[in-house]
Amino acid sequence: MGYKDLLFPKDSFFLVTGGAGFIGSNLCEAILRLGYRVRCLDDLSTGKQKNVDLFIDDPNYEFIKGDIKDFDTCLKACDGVDYVLNQAAWGSVPRSIEMPLFYCANNIQGTLNMMEAARQNGVKRFVYASSSSVYGDEPNLPKTEGREGNLLSPYALTKMCDEEWAKQYSKHYGLETVGLRYFNVFGRRQDPNGAYAAVIPKFIMQLMKGERPTINGDGKQSRDFTYIENVIEANLKSCVAPSEASGEAFNIAYGGREYLLDIYHSLTRALGVDIEPIFGPDRKGDIKHSNADISKARRLLGYDPEYSFDRGLGEAIEWYKDNL
């Protein structure tokens, strides 16, 4: 069963933090299309107003410009809400190495603020974004929950801290929490610009402009790239998963393994260009190989991703052709 078949009470009210970002705006759109109310909280530091301007005239949509580092803002945002989908965080492993204090304040204290605000407002389920980076230097594939290694970046540390706080809130404070370890999400509205842009939209944009993209390392690193529709499914199914899922974290991926160089050549073929990449140095803190075991999410969340990498990549390319 896909997420479009899920049934919530008709007056269900969702809060999406980081709702003007790539994943958050897609969640807002999906919830509105299902006919439910959604409140978007975003400080627009990394999210973009244009991502949510699409919904501005929808009577079921509400926007709060605010920062999760401010507890009063979090309390206000959670008022009357049934489900929180907490996507508000700063990403990027390299940037986290440059800005450790900010990442601690934003990704750890900010998430803790949201958990406490959700608890005080009687939220039914708090679903939050974690990351495959929590596996660190654990070499075995596929990556399996409960078998983590040494963390390789401040970003990974922030996500592991969020998971540990979520366990405490489930255990001691009665807030049902579900953590989603995203594996390299891609799709519509993902920003192709900037030094820390995700690889797929950045490559697409550069190839469409006739530029030579830079591949960090030898291109033989592998990732479990996950299309945005699968992530929407995971978030919404987490809201209605049995209480057995509370306090747990789950791999959210397709369960595949794609090599960066292969993806690059798939993009050049799809875009009809013949451009050789530039090979640059490895990025500090990056994991060489990543591939997910999604059996735990299948079992406890009913997660059954519909979009393969190839299907998702085709849709993403068409979106960027129309929107870049």
Image (cartoon, helix red, strand yellow):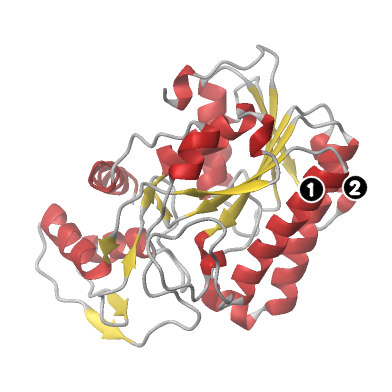
Give how far across and how far down residue 310 sits, in percent: 23, 46
**Can see residue 145?**
yes
Where residue 27 sits, quadrant-wise, is top right
Label 2 vs 1, first from the N-terminus: 2
Looking at the image, is mark 2 or mark 1 nearer the viewer?
1
* Callout 2 crowding tier (Cα within 10 Å): few <14, some 14–19, many ≥20: some
Q: Amino acid type of disc 2?
A: Asp
* Callout 1 crowding tier (Cα within 10 Å): few <14, some 14–19, many ≥20: many
Give residue 83's mark.
Answer: none
Q: CA distance from mark 2 to mark 1?
A: 10 Å
**Can see residue 67?**
no
> Residue at horizontal 32%, vertical 38%?
307
- 230 left or right, relative to 148: left
Where residue 300 sits, quadrant-wise, is top right
Badge 1 element? helix
- 151 left or right, relative to 71: left
Q: Amino acid type of disc 1?
A: Met
The residue sitting at the top extreme is 10
Q: Which residue does the numbered mark 1 point to in the structure image? A: 114
- 58 left or right, relative to 233: right
Q: Quadrant of the N terminus?
A: top left
Give how far across and how far down residue 166 sits, in percent: 74, 50
Q: Which residue does the numbered mark 2 point to in the structure image? A: 72
Label count reads 2
> Residue at horizontal 37%, vertical 59%?
291
Badge 2 element? helix
> Residue at horizontal 60%, vertical 24%?
57
Give how far across and how far down residue 222 sits, in percent: 31, 67
Residue 285 versus residue 252 in the image, above or below: below
> Residue at horizontal 57%, vertical 43%?
24
Front position in the image: 304 or 65: 304
